[in-house]
Amino acid sequence: MHVTRFAPSPNGSLHLGHAYSAIVAHDLAHRGAGLGKGQFLLRIEDIDGGRSRADLADEFRADLAWLGLRWDEVPAQSVRVDDYEVAAATLAAMGLLYPCKCTRADIAANATKSGPDGPVYPGTCKASPPDHGEAVAWRLDVAAALARTGPLEWMDDLAGEQRARPELLGDVVLVRKDPDTPASYHLAVTLDDAADGVTLVTRGADLFAATHVHRLLQELLGLPVPRWYHHALLLDEDGRKLAKRRNSPSLADMRREGKDGLAIAQQLRMGQMPSGITLSASLNSAP
Ligand code: GLU
């Protein structure tokens, strides 16, 4: 029996890709029902103070209920900021964080490698620290961290055993420059999944590479190690991941139009996609 979660960010309405993600996580928690210990959690990932909209959490709950899902809700990220700060201080005390003042433009101009999330940070501020008093983010020194932990592995239930390769993403930001967004996605999600007792981290295959970093953070912070399940993605006619900004219809609109959420959930479970939408290939090896 697994504890799984759906962890939407309230910066836009949910669409069918989110519905699929929530259904996969829900069903994995309750697989082999009868033993009855599985749990499906909802966590609102509202760490991004500048982009989060308070009204969307209620919309998300109504969407999930419309799909026929039941969940237990755990605290939103905005109330866990102290935990993120404590963890960042721990990593800093271990000598594994360094300050960085670089902008996206600086990184784009100086990067020599591209990783799964775009240009890999070239280590500019590691070589030449910013002046005191400048606004800085804090980055994880991945080489120093790996030297401390040694090689690490993690298990994806679809793609199989993986060697953690956080170096693919480079020295990621853990504490952001923007005071409205105190922790980065990587730090917050790793701490939250541990605090919530998640045993099977279920999310889209687009976040596969992020798991290399999360596994490293777990080891550094002494957190339990779950399994992962990176599911296939819903793609539009151009083969791109569904996105609200590209006019994928929202669940809220479908709900208000009187569409049958239970029937839609059942079709998604059976892999029957609405016209114009396809499911990407499932992972049976690392992407
Ligand atoms: N909050 C993230 C999103 O909405 C999901 C994070 C995760 O599942 O790890 O894309």
Image (spheres, helix red, strand yellow):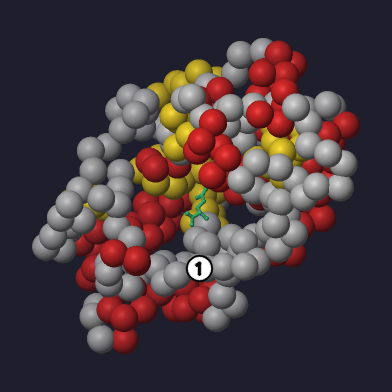
Reading the image, the residue beneath label 1 is 11
Q: Is residue 44 above or below residue 184?
A: below
**Residue found 78% across the figure and 31% down from its top:** 129
Q: Is residue 146 above or below residue 271?
A: above
Quadrant in which residue 167 is drawn: top right
- 118 with respect to 222 (left or right): left
Label 1 residue near ligand 1, CB within 8 Å: no
Disc 1 crowd, CA 10 A, few/some/many (<14, 14-19, 20+): some
Q: Is residue 178 above or below residue 187?
A: below
Q: Position of residue 77 (x, y in %)?
A: 67, 60
> Could you say which is closer to the camera, residue 36 or residue 165?
165
**Residue found 43% across the figure and 34% down from its top:** 116
SS of the residue under disc 1: loop
Give the tally of numbered discs: 1
> Could you say which is closer to the camera, residue 263 or residue 190?
190
Q: Position of residue 275 (x, y in %)?
A: 11, 62
Quadrant in which residue 147 is drawn: top right
**Residue found 57% across the figure and 68% down from its top:** 51
Quadrant in which residue 138 is drawn: top right
**Residue found 29% across the figure and 58% down from its top:** 242
Q: Position of residue 199 (x, y in %)?
A: 57, 41
Q: Quadrant of the C terminus?
A: top left
Q: Position of residue 165 (x, y in %)?
A: 53, 22
